[in-house]
Structures are given as C-alpha cells and as structure tokens.
Image: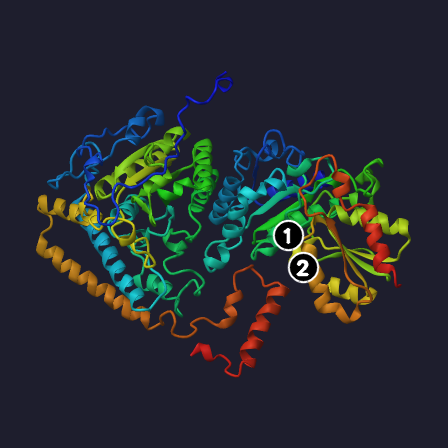
Amino acid sequence: MASEHPRANLQPLTLHIPEPKFRPGDAVDFAEVDVPPAGEARRPDTADKASDFIDLAYTLVRVLDDDGNAVGPWDPKLSPDVMRRMLRSMALLRAFDERMFRAQRQGKTSFYMKALGEEAVAVAAAYALDYEDMCFPSYRQQGLLIARGWSLVDMMNQIYSNTADRLGGKQLPIMYSVKEAGFFSISGNLTTQYPQAVGWAMASAAKGDTRIAATWCGEGSTAEGDFHSACTFAAVYRAPVIFNVVNNQWAISSFSGFAGAEATTFAARAVGYGIAGLRVDGNDALAVYAATEWAAERARTNQGPTLIEHFTYRAEGHSTSDDPGQYRSEGEPNAWPLGDPIKRLKDHLIAIGEWDEERHAAQDKELAEQVKAAQKEAEKNGILGHGLHQPLESLFDGVFEELPWHLKEQRQQMLDEETASGRPWDRKA
Amino acid sequence: MNMIQAINSAMDIMMERDPDVIVMGEDVGYFGGVFRATAGLQAKHGKTRVFDTPITECGIIGVAVGMGAYGLRPVPEIQFADYIYPALDQLVSEAARLRYRSAGEFTSPITVRSPFGGGIFGGQTHSQSPEGLFTHMSGIKTVIPSTPYDAKGLLIAAIEDNDPTLFFEPKRIYNGPFDGYWDRPSQNWSKHPAGEVPTGYYKIELGKAKIVRAGEALTILAYGTMVHVCAAVVAEAGIDAEIVDLRTLVPLDIETIEASVKKTGRCMIVHEATRTSGFGAELSAIVQERCFYHLEAPIERVTGFDTPYPHSLEWAYFPGPVRIGEALKKIMKDA
C-alpha cells in the first residue's frame, strides 16, 4: 500500500483556484475562444436520441457568418418580416434598458439590470416559442416580455413600484410577474425557477395539455442544487421543458471558471443526464431561434427536455450596483469574438437586401421616442421614493389567501402607529 | 382506522373529488410509501397522478411549486421531516412567497406531508421536529394532527387550502396513541375513540385548536404525540388540567389558548422539538403578553434538549412522563 511508504518523495498537493485570462489593465486577446465556422454543426432530426448527437454539446451552433450570410443546416429560413420584427424587439430592448438604466442613475428607482450584448438570447427564444408556452426566466430575460409585445409602461410601473405597479411595490425592480404573457414571477434566489419549470411542464404533460415550459439561468448558477434536481426530474419524466443556460462569462465578478467552465462546456451538463444538449452562439439570433425551435419540437413530440447553452457575453455590469471596471479588462466587451447580436442580424438583413442603415437609424430613433413616451406615461403613476404609492395596509396582502388574526393585529398596530405619529398618512403624499 | 389509514383515506377521497390532486414523493407510488401512507393510491388513480420521484427534496418541492403554478394541487411527501432541509429554500423562499411576490398571479396550493418526531429509535436523522423553522417564516401554514380523526379532516382541509401547507405526521402515534413509556405495550387506535374515522369526506377547519381534556388547575398546550403523553401524565398525577391540542401552529387558535389560560391561571407548554427558539418560545411569549395578569405561576416549557436526537439515548431526550411530571409539580407548587 502507498501509505506504508515514507512520504518524503511525494509531491506536495496544490489547490487550483481558477483565474480569468484578463483583469483590469490587461490587453484582451480572445484567440483561445474556439469559434467554429457558421453552418458547420450538424442538425439532427428532432426524433433522434440524445446520445446520438453528444458532439453538439461541445461545439457552437452558428448560422450567421462574418459576412452576414445565413448558412448551414440550422438556418431557420425565417421570412424577412419575422427577422425584422426580431431585430426591432432586440433594438427596443436595448433602448428600454438604456432608458431605465439612466432612470436608476437619476434616482427614479433603486435598481436595474441590463441585457446589453445578450439581447438575442431572450428575444429570439420568445419568437421560437408559442405565446401560450410558460417561461420561467431569470432576471435578465426582460426580452421575453418585450418580444411578446407586453406593455413597456406596465414594466416601468413595476420598476418604479408606483401606483400602477401590479405587484403592489412588493418586488425588487425588474422582478416582473406577468401570467398573462406566460412570464413566471422572478425570484432573486438563483435557479429556483428550474425545478418549478419542470413541475409546470410535467403538469402540462400529466394533463394532456400541449403547452411546454422554458427556463433560463446564468452559467454561474448551474452550480446550484436546484439546477441538478431539475435536470434529474426532467430526464426521468421526459418533461417537455427547455433549459437555457445563458453563459455570459461573468456571475457578478466571478468568471465562468468558478462554475466549472475550465473543465467542460455547460451544454455538456446535459450529457450526464442523458438529455439533449446544444451549445449555441448566443449572439446569433438565428441560431438561438433555430435551437429553441428544435428543442420546442422535441418537447412537443414527447422527446423530452433539451439543455441549450447560449454562449454570449455580458457587455454591461451585472446590475446598477456593480462596477465591472473593478474586476475585468475594459477591452473585453468590444473584443468579444461573437460580436453584437443586433448588428449581426442587422447586417444579415442588409446583406439580403431587406434592410438598410437609414431605416435602422430611423427605427432606433423611433424606438427611443417610444420608450421615452412610455416612461412619461409610467412616471405619471409615480416613481420610487416619491411618497407612498400603495395603501399602507396592502403590506399584508398576499401572505396568505385570507388574513389570519396575527396579521390582522400587526396591520392594526401599523395603522395605529401611523395615526399616533401625529402626521398620519403623511408618507402617502 | 389508524392514523396512516386515515391519511391514506384523505388523499384517496381528495383524488376522487378533484382530478388536479397529485401525490408524489420517494417510494409513494408502486410501493405505497415506507409507512404505507400512499398504499393503493397509484393502482387506483394511475401513475400520472401518484408517482415516485428522484431523491432530491429540493426537486420534489420545486417541481410541486411549478405544478401548483400550473393549476394542480400537488401533495408531495418528504419521507422524513429530517430530510426537509434540502427543500427549505423552495419552501420558504418560493412556495411561501409566491402569492405575495406575484400579487396573487401565481400561487402554491401544495400540501407537503412529512412524518416527524421521535420515539421510534430513528436516530438523529429520522426523529427531528422542524416545525419551528416554518412557523418562523411567513406565508406557510403548519398543521400537526394528534389523532386519526383529526389527521383525515385536517389533511382534507390542507389539500383544499390555497396556501402552501406543511402537514407534519407524528410517526410515533401512526399506529396508536402513546403514553410516553417506551417499555409499556403500545395501544391501538381501534381501542381509542379518536380511531373511529368516517370513511367519507369531512374536514376540520385549519386554525382551530381542540380541548381534549377540560380542567381548571392549569392549561397544557401541546400537539402531536405530546398530547397523548400529557394526557397520560395528567391522569396518573390526578391533576385537573386542561389539555389543549393546538392542531395547527399557523394559523394559531389564539382564542382557545387565551380563554383557557385566563380560566386556569397556569400554562405549561410541551413539545418534542429542541428548546431554544422552538415554537414553545412563541407560545410562551404570546401567553405572557395576553394573560400575564391572570398567571399564578411562571409559564413552564417542557421540550427536547438542544442536541441532536441521540439514537441509544432516545428516551433521555424525549420529553416523557418524568420530565413533564416534574414540570407539573413545579408549576402547581403554590396551588
């Protein structure tokens, strides 16, 4: 036995702590990021067994090439009209983000999160899913609501926690809940939505429904136990669900290496569970659309779940509370080898003669105006910090369906305190 | 019926009445549960309504929350309450808050069944009483029956309830009431009035305690197994105690508690869970706040110790007749 030998000749063990390639001040070179040519990845039949296309978990499904052409078997062959609508949704999302980010900086709300650089992930998926399908998003998929045509004013009301906030000012800004648009209530606890999406999908299957579920998490939160519980459940019951892992390289300041990216891909998580895995160019709207459409078809035909890794890059900070300049090179966003998802789809539409720079510039202007008008409308209902927008007693609504005695007592106590304060309801003004 | 049969009957009836009721959990399907609580349900209601799950409590509850959001009424089983901790986040951050955070757009009408408590030589991982964790977190209801009759009526009410509910089943009394002496033969529910359980539908409103023994000398607040231990101790001591079986901890029946303590002037609280920050602390505070000027003695708490549940020393840990008897003497000292 090894332990019987003296240990003098043994090498000391070393602990590996992952470190990103570039830190503030470093020059960026993404040459090591393997970007296979567009059109190269094969497209299996949606009825094929997951074990027959394991290679797709280790490559990158890409449709748009560097010249703006849509190539290869994954080209979804969308009509120019659909592509223009997708482009518009992505641009609207960017305009919305820009305006709301500024609103936070102006003190109109407490918090905001942008999807800059990863607009295709949510928007293209929304176009590939049915409106009736249920989405269990994480906090950076506001593009789902925008692509589904949901009211910007309603979203802003939530961000401002104002009188028209349908969530009554009880949720952190951007933690929307829109059942009507198939958008599940967002949790701040990471990846809890994963098993919930599986449960929803299993319920749909158990009832003989035709609707499927889709869920999103970041690459960092694939480390959560919920992710693995969800994969197990989905594999076991062949739940009609699509797992999206948005690999945007950064979980606040921790690079993807801390979630295991040095060892393998996130799409490869699927392999161990025996479920279909695809790794997709997340900045290629057509690839995201094609992958989602393919996964949805698998789900709808009872082939079970698909895990899609969207390889992308978070070009902004994690949130308005984050300063990425403190932990990553400022050259990263522009050096990212997969480019800007909006520009890539725009270039494609221009290349096929269905769009031009002038129309694009005009559209950007129009969208900025649209967002500005929505903001004006929303601000009529108030902004965070300008007094109390909700009735004070609503604080207790929704803990339970009916208010039990102890909450009634606490509510009364609160109202009495307010009255006794000498400036009753002052904060309402 | 014994308590297991009563619980089985409640699920069976609810599955007959409501096609959206689904039973899920480790071993609950073909085998019918390690305690047989789900026996026969899969054969009768089908595999898509009663099914086994992977061993992931976080997954079981997370999936149940999603099913609830879809519109079903899942009744997930956590095989032992000791294993509920991996599911804690899904229960307290998700199920318990979904209605609040979505302004009622999404709800979690789930009923989590779980055998809890000691006295079966289950060691530290098959004996705990985690109810205090959940009563501390807003948005979840906690129900603990002490008889087969109550178990069935309360479980039906919990399944019909639109809020997430934890239904803790005191496994020590699954088969019959228990007098607290480990070396005495067990009784059988068939010899006990509360073992008479109607085969049909009935329910017991959540939030209503039951006075299991009326008395004037002191009030004993207890639930689950402890109701029976207290009853045996009180009978042997010949004290005219009023025993209140709380039945649900959230919502709590404050009226019954307050009226009883004001009547008797003394209050003893008994639970099996560890003492510090246990539900007894909450009960003690409530009684002190509301009944202080009626109290003739300090409130007594009889609980498990602040240790894990020790396997071979189980009966030293268990708040049995000796510990309860000593507390009785203390609280009645000046009577």
Q: Is residue A164 above or below residue B17?
A: below
Q: Is residue A339 above or below residue A323?
A: above
Q: How is the image coloured?
A: rainbow
| Res B17 visible | no
> At label 2, which amino acid type do we have?
Glu
Which residue in the protein does label 1 denote?
B132
Q: Is residue B305 above or below residue A296?
A: below
Query: Is B9 in front, or is A199?
Result: A199
Question: Disc 1, disc 2: CB below 8 Å?
Answer: yes
SS for callout 1: helix
Subunit that carries the residue with mark 1: B
User: Are the residues under badges 1 and 2 in a single subunit?
Assistant: yes
* For marks 1 and 2 on the same chain, the one whose residue lies earlier in the sequence: 1
SS for callout 2: helix
Q: Residue at x 22, y 34 (%)?
A: A34
Q: Residue at x 22, y 49 (%)?
A: A25
Q: Quadrant of the N terminus of chain B?
A: top right
> At label 1, which amino acid type do we have?
Gly
Q: Quadrant of residue B86?
A: top right
- The spot of residue B262 in percent (x, y) is 79, 67
Query: Is A212 in front, or is A3?
Result: A3
Subunit that carries the residue with mark 2: B
- The spot of residue A407 in percent (x, y) is 59, 65
Q: Quadrant of the C terminus of chain B?
A: bottom right
Residue B214 left/right relative to A320: right
Which residue in the protein does label 2 denote?
B282
Q: Is residue B71 above or below residue B51?
A: below
- The spot of residue B11 in percent (x, y) is 63, 42
Q: Residue at x 71, y 47 (%)?
A: B305
Q: How far, Cα to Cα, is label 1 from label 2?
A: 9 Å
- How many C-alpha atoms fall within 10 Å of the one at disc 2: few (<14), some, or many (≥20)? some
Residue B276 left/right relative to A116: right
